[in-house]
Amino acid sequence: MAERRQRRRPEDKTTGRPSWDIKLCCIEALCNVSASADEVVVTADLPNTDPETVKVEQIDKNTLEIKAEMKRKISFNELGITHRQGEFRYFRCLVPVPMSVDVKRMKKEFKRGILEVHLPRKKGSKKVE
């Protein structure tokens, strides 16, 4: 009996899933979340992005969505992936927020391809389990 090989897509080593979505033509942005006593700070790496297209929206009480349009399309070939075809036009990431924050008082700053989002914590908020 012939052995059947299973093909796997390149994946993000931390989540075990691909770091792109072909249907949405987007690449998952690299993000970091840090929390202090007063606020939660989310940083996202969005190189080659038009600052006017950066959007941050609350999906649910524990998740933010960051989206941004690239200034130019990026192909799989440019990423060193030669066995796939396709282009990407957007960055997108879903960011888990570890505690209750006041999204209405959110402040965004975008400099040199790095987005920094400051979210004030709600009074008495505790870490979400």
Image (tube, rainbow, N blue to C red):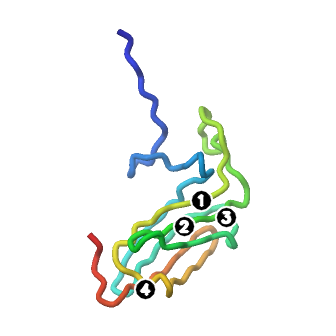
Where is residue 79 drawn, in percent x and y?
61, 45
Q: How far apart are marks 2 and 1 (CA)?
A: 8 Å
Q: Do the numbered discs 1 and 3 sit on residues whose CB atoms are within 8 Å?
A: yes
Nearer to us: label 1 or label 3:
1
Nearer to us: label 4 or label 3:
4
Crowdedness near tag 1: few (<14), some (14–19) or many (≥20) residues, C-alpha within 10 Å: many
Nearer to us: label 3 or label 2:
2
Crowdedness near tag 4: few (<14), some (14–19) or many (≥20) residues, C-alpha within 10 Å: many
The residue that appears at 60% across and 40% down in the rendered structure is 80
Where is residue 64 drawn, in percent x and y?
47, 70
Q: Which of the two labelled residues, at mark 4 and mark 3, occupies the earlier sequence position?
A: 3
Outermost residue, top direction? Answer: 1
Position of the N terminus, as image quadrant, is: top left
Q: Is mark 2 on a helix, strand or loop?
A: strand
Q: Is mark 1 on a helix, strand or loop?
A: strand
Say above or below: 23 vs 71: above
Which amino acid does the dot numbered 4 rest on?
A: Pro
Residue ID for mark 2: 66
Which amino acid does the dot numbered 2 rest on?
A: Ile
Q: Nearer the viewer, residue 78 or 83?
A: 83
Disc number for residue 49: 3
